Amino acid sequence: MNLNTAKKELAYYMRRLYRQKLTTTLGGNLSMRLEDGTIIITPSATDKGRMKSSEIGVMDISGKMIGAEFKPSIETEMHLNIYRVRPDVNAVVHAHPVTACAFAAASAKINCNLIIESSAMLGTIGYADFHYMGTQALADSVAEATKTSNAVIMKNHGALAVGINIVEAFERLEVMENAAKMTLIAEGALKNCLTPLSEDQITP
């Protein structure tokens, strides 16, 4: 896949993520690692429902921009850290699907063994501790969780999935959100176990 085709693909999946109500207008970020090691990533502060391929940024694994300058996502280092620790991963999808985020705000865990699809696609979900968005601590925590999991719940933040390509990563995020819905319906799993943000966490 050449660079222009890859950028069109990433922009398409960003728009699709928004259309399927898996993230908000300015929330979430997607990236892909190309065959030559180049990283393409969605930019910050742009309308995710109208994402264009021309807005997609290009960088190397160190975070150095290649070509036209752009405003990187604040979670860029998180994406790069994942690629550094997972050489098999070529796509990262980070979003804020409502049901999975409800579990991110609770001590309850998503049950992936209610149906075979989620068990096969996700295995065991990883859980990353809370760190303020855009921080190195968050990037390190999430990358560590992906060493043993292809889907991660980020405490009081959101959800993330990885894959060998953007299709697999996107599918895993969808399956995780569906597993969260099934767990909520079947088990009522969030009752009496919510853990809202503290004042110290809200203001870093």
Image (cartoon, rainbow, N blue to C red):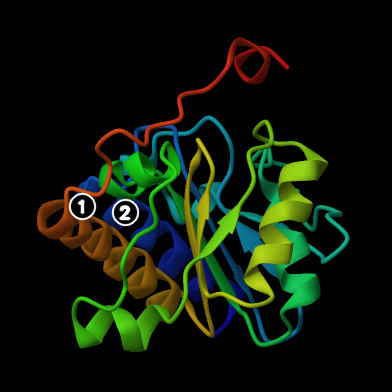
| Quadrant housing the C terminus | top right
Instruction: Find residue 45 and report its horizontal and vertical position in percent.
Output: 53, 30
- Residue 20: mark: 1
- The residue identified by callout 2 is 17
Q: Nearer the viewer, residue 83 or 155?
A: 155
Residue 134 placement: quadrant: top right
| Quadrant housing the N terminus | bottom right
Q: Is residue 14 left or right of residue 140?
A: left
Residue 74 placement: quadrant: top right
Residue at 37% across / 64% down in the picture?
173
Residue at 45% across / 30% down in the picture?
195
Give the CA distance from mark 1 to mark 2. 5 Å
Q: How many marks?
A: 2
As displayed, is residue 39 above or below residue 96? below
Look at the numbered disc 2 and give the secondary structure of its residue. Answer: helix
Q: Nearer the viewer, residue 203 or 103?
A: 103
Instruction: Find residue 114 and report its horizontal and vertical position in percent.
Output: 20, 76
Look at the numbered disc 1 and give the secondary structure of its residue. Answer: loop
- The answer to whether the residues at label 1 and label 2 have Cβ atoms under 8 Å apart is yes
As displayed, is residue 116 above or below residue 139? below
Residue at 52% across / 75% down in the picture?
150
- Residue 177: mark: none
Crowding around mark 1 (Cα neighbors within 10 Å: few <14, some 14 to 19, many 20+) is few
Q: Nearer the viewer, residue 22 or 100?
A: 100
Residue at 82% across / 65% down in the picture?
60
Instruction: Find residue 199 and report its horizontal and vertical position in percent.
Output: 60, 10
Callout 2 amino acid: Leu
Callout 1 amino acid: Gln
